[in-house]
Amino acid sequence: MKRIILAIVCAVSFGHFAYADTPPAMPVPRVSIFSTTTDWQALTGLTLNEYRGVFTPDSKLIGPKGLVLYYLDAFPCYGLGDGVRVWFGQNGKHDGDLRIACVYAPETITFSYRNAARDADDARNTGMLTCPVSSDGRELSIDMAKCQKGKDWDEYR
């Protein structure tokens, strides 16, 4: 019995010393970005107003699966809650609304995009899409045929 216990202790000790020089694998940190709670009106003295996006779809950009857009916050505008994701499909179908708070109506707006079906999860997107905007009061008109594709995410360093 003593030999069995001694053999187990030796095996465990040997295993420990065999890997003693190998550092433990460090987990890769993942950064999560959440909307700030900063009161931008108080900090800047500027008034924020709510704007809604109205899109003119472009079938070439949408493609056969559909197109998912995620609004990318940029001063003077910030996304509002669930109003930052919009899906477009063929034949004028869409799901979601663009709702943003802005100091003034922007001249361009930038989205993260990817071609995907309506119910696709929040998988990795392709890159950026920048679109010119015209405004009529609190309504932002976005003609998707005039949008320009930027770099794909894997091209950024």
Image (spheres, rainbow, N blue to C red):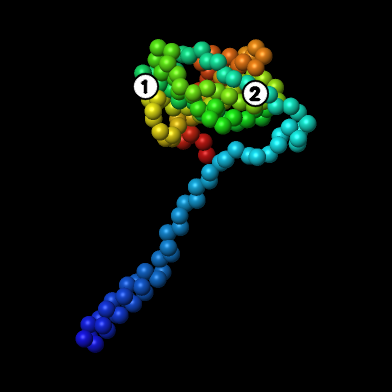
Question: In the rendered image, which residue does mark 1 sit on?
Answer: 65
Q: Secondary structure at mark 1?
A: loop
Q: Along the horizontal axis of the image, is 20 left or right of 42?
A: left
Residue that appears at 65% across and 40% down = 37
Q: Residue furthest right?
A: 45
Residue 77's spot in the image, x, y percent?
A: 64, 27
Residue 115's spot in the image, x, y percent?
A: 41, 25
Position of the N terminus by quadrant: bottom left
Q: Secondary structure at mark 2?
A: strand
Residue that appears at 50% across and 47% down = 30
Residue that appears at 52% across and 22% down = 97
Q: Nearer the viewer, residue 94 or 29?
A: 94
Q: CA distance from mark 1 to mark 2?
A: 31 Å
Q: Is residue 67 above or below residue 29?
A: above
Q: Along the horizontal axis of the image, is 76 left or right of 142?
A: right
Q: Which corner quadrant of the image does residue 68 belong to?
A: top left
Q: Nearer the viewer, residue 15 or 2?
A: 2
Q: Nearer the viewer, residue 128 or 42?
A: 42
Question: In the rendered image, which residue does mark 2 sit on?
Answer: 50
Residue that appears at 76% across and 35% down = 42
Name the residue type under label 2.
Glu
Residue 122's spot in the image, x, y percent?
A: 44, 34
